Amino acid sequence: MPTLYHHPMSSASRFIRLVLGEYGFEYDLVEEQPWEGRREFLALNPAGTLPVFLDDSMRSLCGAVVISEYLDETHGALKRDRRLLAENSFQRAEIRRLVEWFLVKMEQDVTRHLARERVFKLQMPTAQGGGAPDSKLMRAARGNIRQHMKYLTWLAGSRPWLAGDRLSYGDLAAAASISVLDYLGEIDWSEFPQSKDWYQRIKSRPSFRPLLGDRIRGVTPASHYADLDF
Amino acid sequence: MPTLYHHPMSSASRFIRLVLGEYGFEYDLVEEQPWEGRREFLALNPAGTLPVFLDDSMRSLCGAVVISEYLDETHGALKRDRRLLAENSFQRAEIRRLVEWFLVKMEQDVTRHLARERVFKLQMPTAQGGGAPDSKLMRAARGNIRQHMKYLTWLAGSRPWLAGDRLSYGDLAAAASISVLDYLGEIDWSEFPQSKDWYQRIKSRPSFRPLLGDRIRGVTPASHYADLDF
């Protein structure tokens, strides 16, 4: 059975869990603390980043983009109207643009700072960067949430799904990142009804259920985190 | 004719220029200062990042990964043994892993800091972040060069090209990032003969010639920058 090395507060890991869920994969989930720099983990991915997917032949695939492209080529292409990347190259480009928006840009502007300051630093030993959260960094990250929510709302309001007519990697990447922030209670849904409607649809999918069951030691989720009707 | 919006000190832009050069594209090159946040540029790419490729139908493709995947699907796939992505999915994953290594990891650890502190800050108005370079940031970035050069040397020493038997996106992404640092004289080649041999092979390709002609106002390149025999 394949294995996914992940962390519950890593957006990129959540994205791949959603993809694997949508495609009905059976796999083992192993939680990794990437800041530990475990030798066995670095042998799988010298970059030391999450997620890492170990296939049935024990070959490792490193990083969300690499894994999602591989899964599309080896599984998605056979799924017809359940494929999470489009057939048309220009539509594929639009989906990939959104994946990059949510897993790279929003990650750098917002998500990774809040995940790090509010979660990872609690789990890290001081020598590896643990300690009290940096409130200046958190304030800057929070200040960027609105811009991303506005963009999400524009996308959700102008198309049935974020990249077009069909559920795609774009929706799953966005939902992955948003769900980390929602766990931490950082999203004010009342301001963004169209985004809320979109998130409600995603959240109700069976592929999302395992994410709603995630619990982080020492960090209680927002009270509405697992509610389908929030 | 298509247009590429780029900056000469952006690794991701250089990567796409190399890909377009290898595939023999004719295109217009437009220099963009992304920190200016020009409205017309943001209309092409709301993320405000480089590179952006505008195709013959004036449709924009945003970011190096999106552009390179699109070029592979629409052109590379027809190039047989000159294709810059492999046919086999697992080899494609390895090439993509290296692209991510050099354009994301090495970028975050090293290249973007040195490009920003030594080049962009000279071009930026103070209000947009310009000013004197931050020597602490530069020292940290320089401290990370060795680790990346060692990894490059290991790849160059164990395979004919970085990702395997054929020139690939992996080589072009690595060369793009290295060439920015080499312009700035940040690479000590004497320590890494196998990387030097690989870089010499890439540097001699016709696709590389335009990059060797780049000159930045106020920043003279290292004396060996444009030498094929350095």
Image (spheres, coloured by chain):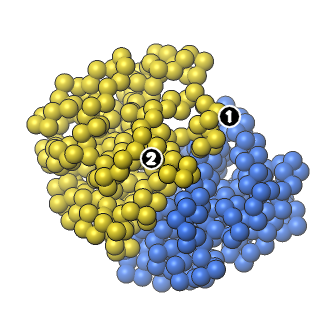
Chain colours: A yellow, B blue
Q: Residue at x 20, y 43 (%)?
A: A203
Q: Residue at x 81, y 66 (%)?
A: B200
Q: Amino acid at mark 1?
A: Ala
Q: Which labelled disc corresponds to residue B140?
A: 1
Of labels 1 and 2, the one closer to you: 2
Q: Amino acid at mark 2?
A: Met
Q: Chain ID for label 2? A: A
- Rendered image quadrant of residue B222: bottom right
Residue ranking furthest to the left = A229
Q: Residue at x 52, y 65 (%)?
A: B89
Q: Is residue A215 above or below residue B134?
A: above
The kind of secondary structure element at disc 2 is loop
- Residue B25 visible at all: yes
- Rendered image quadrant of residue B57: bottom left
Q: Is residue A56 above or below residue B224?
A: above
The answer to whether marks 1 and 2 mark residues whose Cβ atoms lie closer than 8 Å is no
Residue B224 at x, y percent in the picture: 84, 60
Q: Chain ID for label 1? A: B
- Alpha carbon distance from label 1 to label 2: 41 Å
Q: Nearer the viewer, residue B203 or B122?
A: B203
Q: Residue at x 28, y 69 (%)?
A: A80
**Left or right of A158 on screen, residue B56:** right
Sort mark 1 into few (<14), some (14-19) or many (20+) by Cα contacts within 10 Å. Answer: some
Q: Which labelled disc corresponds to residue A1?
A: 2
